[in-house]
Image: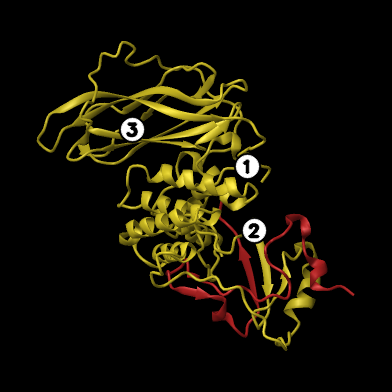
Chain colours: A red, B yellow
Amino acid sequence: MTTLADLQDTRYGNLNFAIGERFPDIVLPNANDNSALSLADFHGQKVMLHIFASW
Amino acid sequence: MVIEQHPDRTRLFMQWQQMDWSIMVDPFNLLNMRVVPCTLAIDEHGIIRAVQPRLDRASEFEDLFVQQQFDAPTEPVIARKIITQAEKPSDADAHALSDYAVALTLWGDDTLLDEAVAVSEQALSIQADDRTHFNLGVIYRMRYDSVYRQADDFMQAVNHWTAALNYDPNNYIWRRRIQQYGPRLDKPYPFYDWVLQARADIQARGDEPIILSIEPAGAEFAAPMQNFDTQLKQSNPDPDNRIYQDTEPLILADIVVVPPQIVAGESVRVHITLRTSQDAHWNNEVDDTLLWLHEADQWQIDRPFQTVAKGDGDTSNENRHFEVELRSTSDMPIGQQLINAYSLYYICEDVNGICLYRRQDFTIPIEILPDTGRKLKDGG
C-alpha cells in the first residue's frame, strides 16, 4: 500500500525535515506587509509550504 | 517561504507569477536549509506528513494528503524552536547574541543595522562558527544596501559568507549567496535575469511593477559564460600618467573581490565602487567615468576598459559601480597577486568649488591558495 513517504522525491538528499515531526516554531516577516507570520496562524488547516528562492 | 537576501525581489516575482498567498521571508536561512526548492505537506496539527512529494504522482498525493483527515498526535510532538531573541541577552551567550542581531534586522528598521553589526561581531568574538559568520555576512550586506553603508560592508559580507562556507562546503544556500556576486564561470544560471521579463509582462497586463529598493546589477544578471572579451577596443587612455592624481581624494574607491580567495585556474569578479567624499560631487557636464585595468602576467581580464555613464543633471553624488572578471592561469603562484588599475573622472570639490579631471590608481589584491581540493564551484 502506497504511503506519503513513498511519494518523496529522494534526489535532493537530506532536506532537514522528517515525516512525523512538528514543523519548527518560527515567526518571520510576511513579504507582503512585513507583518509577523507563523505556521501557527494556519492551525486547523492543511498547509503546503514551498521553500524557495526567486533566483 | 523565501530564502534570499532581498525580499522585495520576491514581491516582484509574486506579482509577476500572480501568487497571492502568504510568503515568509528568511534571508538568514534560519531553518538551515541546505537546498531549495523544498516542499512540505503539513497537516491540521502542524505535523509534517510529506517531504518533497513528487509532482508526477500528484493524484496519489491528493488522495493521501488533501483528502485525508489526520488525527491529532496522542503524545505531544515537540517542535524545534527557532526564535529570534527579542531582548538583548547576556553578553556571554554567543548564539543568543547572534539571534538578537537577526531579530534587530528582521523586525527593526535600517537605523538598527549598526547595532546589529556590533552585536553580531560580539557574538563572533565569543564563538566563531558557521551560522554566526553567515548571519553577520547577511547583516553587513543589508547595511551596504542601506543609507548607513560603510566602506568595507560588502567585503565584510563576502568574507563572512566565505568563512561560513569553509565550515560547511556543502551548504548550497550559503554558496549561492556568494555566487550571486561572483564570476560567471561559477554560476549555474543567471540569478535575476527574470526581473526584466517580469516587468515587461506586468506592464503588458496594465499593472505597475513593484519598485525594487536595490536593483540587481552586473553579476546578478550575468549568465554563465566561459569566454572572456579580452580584445582591446580602446587603448590605455592615460599611458604616461599625465592626468593629475586625485590626492585628496575626492573620490573613494571600494574594491571587493568575489570570492576573496581562489586556487590557480579559477576566476574572480571584482566590484569597484566609486563614491564621492564629503562635499565633492560628480561633474556631469563633461564625459563618462573610465576604468582601465593594466595587463597582468598570467591573468585574463574580461573587458579591461569600461565606462560608467555620467549622471543626470549638472552634478550628482551617486555611487558609480564597475564589475570586471579575471581568470588566473593554472600555474599561477600561490600568494597574494596585485592587479593594477585606475579610474579617470570629472569631479568638483564642493557646491561652488573647482571642477577637476582626476585620476586615481588602485591595486586589486587577489589571494591564490594552495589547491587542496577546495573549490567554490559546485554542480548546483
**In this rendering, would B19 be left or right of B320?**
right
- Pointer 3 local density, CA inside 10 Å: few below 14, some 14–19, many at least 20: few
Classify B61 as above or below B219. below
Q: Amino acid at mark 1?
A: Pro
Q: Earlier in the sequence, mark 2 or mark 3?
A: 2
The residue drawn where x is 55% and y is 46% is: B191
The residue drawn where x is 52% and y is 49% is: B197
Mark 2 lies on a secondary structure that is loop
- Picture coordinates of residue B203, whole percent (x, y): 46, 55
Chain ID, mark 1? B
Mark 3 lies on a secondary structure that is loop
- Picture coordinates of residue A19, whole percent (x, y): 73, 72
- Pointer 2: what residue? B37
Chain ID, mark 3? B
Examine the rendering and report whether any part of residue B175 can be seen.
no
Distance in Å between CA atoms under marks 1 and 3: 30 Å
**In this rendering, would B232 be left or right of A40?**
left
Q: Earlier in the sequence, mark 2 or mark 1?
A: 2
The residue drawn where x is 74% and y is 85% is: B69
- Pointer 3: what residue? B309
Which residue, as the protein is rendered here, is positioned at the far top? Answer: B240
